Image (cartoon, rainbow, N blue to C red):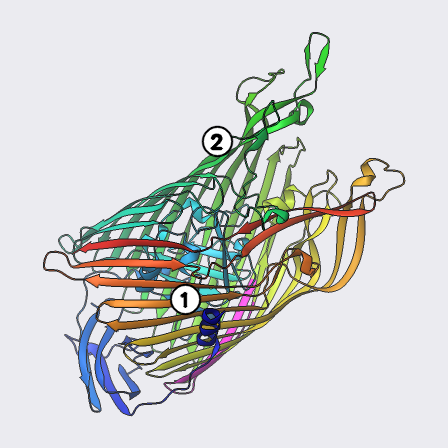
Amino acid sequence: MRKSTVVFFLFFIFPAISMAQLQINGKVSDAKSGEPLPGSHIVLKGTQLLTTANEQGEFEFKDIPKGDYQFVVSYIGYKKLKQDVRIDKDLVLDFKLKTQAITGEEVIIRSTRALDNTPTTYQNISREEIQENDMGQDLPYLISLTPSMVVTSDAGAGVGYTAMRIRGSDQSRINVTINGVPLNDPESQSVYWVDLPDFGSSVENIQIQRGVGASTNGAAAFGATVNLQTAKLRANPYAEINSTAGTFNTFRNNVRFGTGLIKGKFAFDGRLSKISSDGYVDRATSNLKSFFVSGGYYGDKTLMKLNIFSGKEITYQAWNGVPKDMLETNRRFNPSGMYFGPDGDTLYYDNEVDDYKQDHFQFFFVHEFNEKLNVHAALHYTHGFGYYENYKMGESFSKYGLDDVIIGGDTITESDIITRKYLDNHFYGGVFSLNYENKRMKLTAGGGGNYYDGGHYGNIIWAQYASNGSIDRDWYNNDGIKKDFNTYAKFNYLLTEKLNLYADLQYRHVDYEINGTHDDLRDISQEHQFDFLNPKAGLHYDFNKHHAAYFSIAIANREPSRNNYRDADENHVPEAEKLTDYELGYEFKSSKFSANANLYYMNYTDQLVLTGEINNVGDAIMANVPESYRAGIELAAGWQINKLLRWDVNFTFSQNKIKDFAEYVDNWSYWDDPENQPLQYEKYLGETDISFSPDIIAGSVIKLKPFKNFGISFISKYVGRQYIDNTSSKERSLDPYFVNNIHLNYRLKTSLVKKIDFFLRLNNVFSEKYESNAWVYRYYYDGVEGEVNGYFPQAEFNFLGGIRITLE
């Protein structure tokens, strides 16, 4: 109890700060011509301070305490400058940057990124921060401590199927791009991180935009945007070896390498990775492999680059969860693959797996016409193929379109079978942007066109009784064809030296067609078209070097997903959803302390939620609710207490409501007496909480560096109560949880090896027993309510440790 109290106190008490007195003025200019470089980025390492040079290339830092610092100065088209400076009095510094005979890769992602003075809520995560947390877990775990973020793992330990929610919005409502190329599956609109194992090792930086954010390519940003940039050019050759081992037989090994610039024009980079884990949940094994290769031509004005990356996953299914009544007695229980033998004994099918491979190809072209104008274009292609396999007992032949079997005088109507459900999909297209910039304005015009062809079919690979089917017989087959086109224009314009106007307008056209039969033999052929107009506007005001504020209004529209259409019938055709997002923010920065506060109100029209309603064959559907909203405040702060100690903390307090909600619960007695029993019971509940949207989310990281090259971090995460359905019932909710981790790292430098990093992460050090996700199905039979459910318990105390060797 005492340990928890101490951590809780450190986590929630907000510190006071004191200001220093010294001042730094300076100028950034071209080393050859002496011309100022307005918009240059100047970062004062070891503090919270960063700034951009004004129109004369000048910058200023105030209230700097005495000490040794490093300035990092960068500007597109120029070599980054790092300079150590001893500050013991007011200084005037002059930074001269040398041109770089390559076109900057920042152009590739610029069209989808928020800029410094863009009035939207966002956070940038650097390569150093990613690498510090990268131990082979899926990418959501590398960014789990950012504001309003909740992550979950089917296997319970962050390897295998994982997912994230931002402000309560799930993966299907979070737009994800890699180098500006859409990653979301066009049909489900979700992202499956297990298909890209160890991808964090190839990510250079990440920007998370909460809310609608800026216009981007692919699926609608209906809750957040996660924008990934892969590894950028490194001028010198390098090699890196990573090895991690931990609880549940978890192992991660990878090799990264790069040639550096060859003849000043060419560079090649690569990564090979293998990850395996038994998982916290029984038999929730993962066997994951991936690679990333990149080659580029870096000319004076032109950049051409090809990225190829691939992931292969074989995971034992753990997506059914643990029944609630088993959490106290056997919380690691996995019902997947379970069947009963001839003697009634419990057996498990060895190959109850998900087996899938995804290959990505990206080609980029960037050309700078002059210092003010550049163009970017990209072509992409993704191919995914795989299946998941199930052993099923006592399945009726008619369910699969097969004839009953007659043996002697007996008619056999059912059989044990093994099925595979396949996905074979192709996704390709192109994106482009034209970027113009002068002293007062930054303008981007761009867009993209994508084509998706997704094949879905089911295969019976074995049956106890053969019936009239052949081996490998398909019992259903359907295709989804989706065409997506968007174009947008957005600009930042300095109305005054302190006030920036932002405007963004996107037009998006969607054409979606399904042809064929589903696994229940229904013909699900249909076609839908949408035309969306998504405007955004806002203002950003810099009061001075320390204080800034912004306000924005943004509208997003989202089409229903494949599942919404597949499970619907003529009485439940889903409508498109609309979101109007209001964001109001304030930022403060000083040499020792930074803080920001953001108020948001996300107003939904026709949001699709689970109500309990079913279609004409009894499958659950998503139904539109006319009015719902998410409203909250996000607070974040960072305090560099001294050279040895730093504290970062964030809080989200929110309300997430459906204004008028009616629930529907199945009546199983209907099937016994359809003339006198209703199919479902309906109950009006009024205003209720949106599922999986906790009122409180908080994160804390306390970093201590007691001596050179050694660091220890105390990491805490609190997530409030989450309702499993939309009825606000505490009986169907996940209890709040407070999880604490400790991370230790030590860096060794030698004459032979540039650096050797040792790291150890102790997760859930107080062995909190908690569940981060769940599902529930309710019914009535003979007037008595019952339910079927599945909960996803997360690992108690566990650890990951390893070594990283870097040669350069």
Residue 126, given in percent of the width and then of the height, sits at: 33, 65
Q: Would residue 323 be found to the left or right of residue 117 on screen? A: right
With 328 as the anchor, is 310 left or right in this view?
Answer: left
Please tell me which residue is depicted at 25% across the width and 57% down the height of the picture: 302
Which residue is labeled 1 in the image?
A: 715
Q: Out of 4 and 186, give the one closest to the viewer.
A: 4
- Residue underneath mark 2: 351
Q: Is residue 123 visible?
A: yes
How far across and down, in percent of the image, does residue 768 sit?
50, 59
Which secondary structure, mark 1? strand
Q: Residue at x 44, y 67 (%)?
A: 716
The foreground one among 510 and 648 is 648
In the shown orientation, is residue 71 left or right of residue 784? left
User: Reading the chain from its start, which is encountered first: label 2 or label 1?
Assistant: 2
Residue numbers of the magenta segment: 534-554
Q: Residue at x 19, y 65 (%)?
A: 100
Q: x%, y% of residue 137? A: 39, 52
Q: Disc 2 vs disc 1: which is toward the camera?
A: 1
